[in-house]
Image (cartoon, coloured by chain):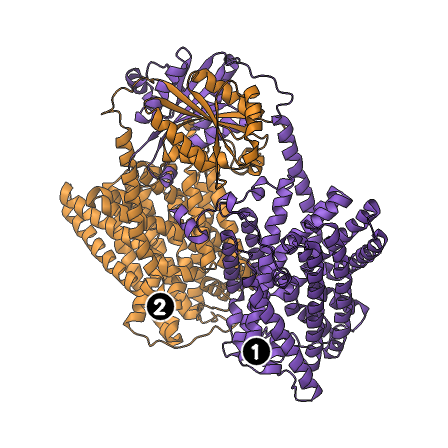
Chain colours: A purple, B orange
Amino acid sequence: MSTSFKRMLIGKPIATEQQHHERLRKITALAVFSSDALSSVAYATEAILSVLILAGSSALGMGLPVAGGIAALLIVVAISYRQTIHAYPNGGGAYIVAHENLGKLSGLIAAAALLIDYVLTVAVSISAGVAAITSLAGNWGFPGLENFSVEISLLCILVVGLANLRGVKESGAIFALPTYVFIISIVAMLGWGLIGTLFGFARPVVQSVAPTVSASDAIGLWLILRAFAAGCTALTGVEAISNGIPAFKQPEAKNAAITLAWMAAILVTMFLGITWLAGQLHAIPNDLTHETVISQIARSVFGVGPIYTIIQVSTALILVLAANTSYADFPRLSSLLAKDRFLPRHFASQGDRLVFSNGIIVLSLFAAILVVIFKANEIAMLPLYAIGVFISFTLSQGGMVRHHLREREQGWRRGLLINGIGAVLTAVVLAVLAATKFTHGAWSVLVLIPLMVLVFDAIHAHYQSIAAQLSLSNASKPQAVRRITAIVLVSGIHKGVLPALQLARTMAPDNATAVMVNLDPEGSAKIRDRWSEWGCEIPLVILESPFRSLVTPLLHYVDQVDDLYGDDELLIFLPEFVPAHWWEQLLHNQTGLILRAALTFGRGKTIISVPYKLGK
Amino acid sequence: MSTSFKRMLIGKPIATEQQHHERLRKITALAVFSSDALSSVAYATEAILSVLILAGSSALGMGLPVAGGIAALLIVVAISYRQTIHAYPNGGGAYIVAHENLGKLSGLIAAAALLIDYVLTVAVSISAGVAAITSLAGNWGFPGLENFSVEISLLCILVVGLANLRGVKESGAIFALPTYVFIISIVAMLGWGLIGTLFGFARPVVQSVAPTVSASDAIGLWLILRAFAAGCTALTGVEAISNGIPAFKQPEAKNAAITLAWMAAILVTMFLGITWLAGQLHAIPNDLTHETVISQIARSVFGVGPIYTIIQVSTALILVLAANTSYADFPRLSSLLAKDRFLPRHFASQGDRLVFSNGIIVLSLFAAILVVIFKANEIAMLPLYAIGVFISFTLSQGGMVRHHLREREQGWRRGLLINGIGAVLTAVVLAVLAATKFTHGAWSVLVLIPLMVLVFDAIHAHYQSIAAQLSLSNASKPQAVRRITAIVLVSGIHKGVLPALQLARTMAPDNATAVMVNLDPEGSAKIRDRWSEWGCEIPLVILESPFRSLVTPLLHYVDQVDDLYGDDELLIFLPEFVPAHWWEQLLHNQTGLILRAALTFGRGKTIISVPYKLGK
């Protein structure tokens, strides 16, 4: 029954040979790989403004300069990544580039940082998408939907997770439509907003409920740095194209580089445009209505009507797509780590739908936990976000620097310069992020990353130790079995123990014993009587148990016999009756389970379970 | 390590022969068995008033007449139970009396009702005890402690549960001191309050925060019935003495009957006195401060000082003792049910401290859940309470009626009259309780009881079916084993599989096969090479798995072999390497577990686990 439920949810199994790869045209590839980066404009401006407003509304004017700085950084990072694309045409994720060039530790740090950021991408994007929908609902006269943000977000994670367990076909069509609708409608909003501002017919945002603006902090360098750090979330996802080069049509590297340039241009345009328009129209984060800044701008430019609705819906959709890219990246990275033995091997095995099911499930779980902790408030999650991305940027660019120095390929000096600037710049920004966000929650990420690296390392050591111990290279041929000693652990005298007794007598005709614990002092004589009839001529040992434990005396007896016949192969027979339904097992004492664990894990004994199957 | 932690918490094991029983004097027995009944005065008056106040402060005058009716009912029930004491000198709980006289179904209904009420007794008593302490703290200048009621209550349940897992000695001293301090201090409060009222120096309660009194309901018969029903919680625990007769000194029945009369007299006095004084001093339930009515009366009579503190602390202590009586009753009743095969047999086994550990753990868990659901507000739980007690009263008295009719012992007509009146009266009150409390939560109890009875019955049917199937009465001698066929399920070629191969060759020299699933299409030739060196001369079958499943092809192969050699004894060898620590097992695929479950539960196959123990 559980199987057919699973089939209904995720579909029939897919054979290994049906695995195939679609090659993408640039215009489709842009949609497939850019949703994460482009969708960040849905919250990056709001993130900047929500810091600046701490110094009062007058500080909001700093929004555009801060966004300009971020846009410049974005351009540098994009140029740096073009180098990576050409150097690693088979896909140059930060884990691979850092591992190959800077060593295992750097690779693991990059991997830990990326895994954390993938989880945050899901949580942030889904929450922001739900915020777009609740803002839409609020303006169409259904306020109060934001009270269910957590539930709706969890539902979205469930749906996206299930879709990925089925295996989402990376057919560009699914991605292309919402992505281009989003780009076009945002650009239209910027254009019409610009015209309205120039010709004076654009009216500022009317807040349905006035937000609280308390000028507690003075505007200063620190606040500007904090705003800058908050806006750096716009850079997340920029590395996606360099991970996915093999999916491009030939020439892969060149097409990928061109697509990256397009993406950077679109992202910079939208981000700066939205930030500028927010300033013009006085759109500000509103803690009370939870209406997003994009929603405020859109309804101010177009009014609450069809175009506004398209903007909100396509924003929500591209954010869901952004979350979906993490569902490709997280399982792929965790399977790479598992193949290198840094994560449990479960992450390396493809499920029956050819996807890395365990990675998908783990990602969904952690994202759901974040959504619950942060009550689906994406702005509150942002201090944790982007740290991981900048760690991976820095390590990846640093790895490229090392790469150029080692390879000295054609034009390596130019590459060295570009990646050197990229590495230094992202390292500086990383320091700014860590410093400004530290007390706002980023400490937890900075604590988590070394812990994860330690765990990766411990897992690796474990697998290596197991492999060495199991290796046949220094093994001697096993000795032949000398003689078999059998012990049958019986709970009473009933039909269920007869097959085990019979089998024990066959295997160890001259050295089999049955042993049982008797809790009823008066019952021994009666038991011996019945045993003489049903005991299959195997001698019975009855043990006393002053403390009413069934397990301790049996283990003690097994140890004694083991000492006595040390050279023999000791076989322990566990007769067990098996009810028709597994849950009926719960109605019976779990002595068998405890005995099995103690004999296997503690003593390494061979156990023969002889089941006696019961009917309904 | 987990063992030594358990020892620290609950102490060393106790041998079966150390079991002993202390016989109690009447004065100690009163303390041991009455805490549940007597402690109910801590909330019964407040329960009545919290209903009456719905019709405004003028309705509070009905409190005393309502309490008078409940007191009359209590006297009738107590007289009825004296009959049970004489008829069942070995302990006549409602389950036994109803089961013996009215049949299995009545017995099970009484048992279900009592189990529910025992859980409620713990939740209500602990919550009321914590309310006494938070009221005390509030008056001594530490308000706000009531915000931690849930946490403190859960801690109390944990402590009482652990104490009972250690085994609380029923030495009367622990019970006697707080019980008599409680009785004396409450009587002192009533006496001084009476004098103060007569001589005019008693001043009414000053509410630190005015409670909200909204006269929404008109005072009417329905409201009076509801108040009556709410106050009936004063009767819970009256049956405790009739359960515990064997603990009395000889003559047991006579001593128990006398103690019951004392208890009823004390209970009626305190209950009526508190209700009267609450009316005189205008003590009313206060939703805002959560100060209990007893606390209001006590501080009004004595002022916030040492005597007030003694009253509050002894109230809290006797309430904890009341909860503790459920820790004797619930495990005892559930062990009776388990011995009669109506509950899983786990409830019948005594732990190594000679207590019914599973009953104690289950009781603590359910009580904790109730405390969390009802936020440790005992007044909110009361609608669920007392229904179970009155069901057991009715069935127990009904059983006694049948008993008299059947036994026709000396004086049976008088007994019949007394128990007949008791049965009819408690049945009528039960109807009132069910009707008035139904929509306030009592429906859940009335739904739960039949469900529990169904579960009891299903469990009974299961155990009977198992016993019949395992019975040797119609068994034939087992057939000798004809020939052994062995299949070794191997995951690869490494040291861990060698012992299993060796053992299989010894046991089935001419009919052993090894089988393995190969997921790497190119690897087969290499595997065959290595197998020829290490395979212990056992033929190897390599299975293909187009859907990458390890389990399905192996099971399919086992089924094929089983069909082929149907008469043979089929032994399935599972070689497994065992890491040094059990948690390291999590890092390896759980294929072995799934195979084991499918082979044991689905197919009833004999499985031989051959462990290969690894070092650190």
Can you say whether A206 is above or below B250 in the image? Answer: below
Nearer to the camera, A566 or B378:
A566
Nearer to the camera, A366 or B24:
A366
**Which residue is at a point 68% across and 60% down the rendered structure image?**
A236
* Residue at image mark 1: A308
Nearer to the camera, B278 or B9:
B9
Nearer to the camera, A107 or B427:
A107
Subunit under mark 2: B
* Residue at image mark 2: B63
In the image, residue A83 lies at what x, y percent?
A: 76, 55
In the image, residue A168 lies at what x, y percent?
A: 52, 55
- The crowding category of the residue bearing disc 2, from other C-alpha atoms within 10 Å (few below 14, some 14 to 19, many at least 20), is many
Q: Residues under labels 2 and 1: Cα distance?
A: 63 Å
Subunit under mark 1: A
Kindly state the secondary structure of the residue where label 2 is placed. Answer: helix
Can you say whether A529 is above or below B369 in the image? Answer: above
Can residue B460 be seen from the camera position used here?
Answer: yes
Can you say whether B242 is above or below B543 in the image? Answer: below
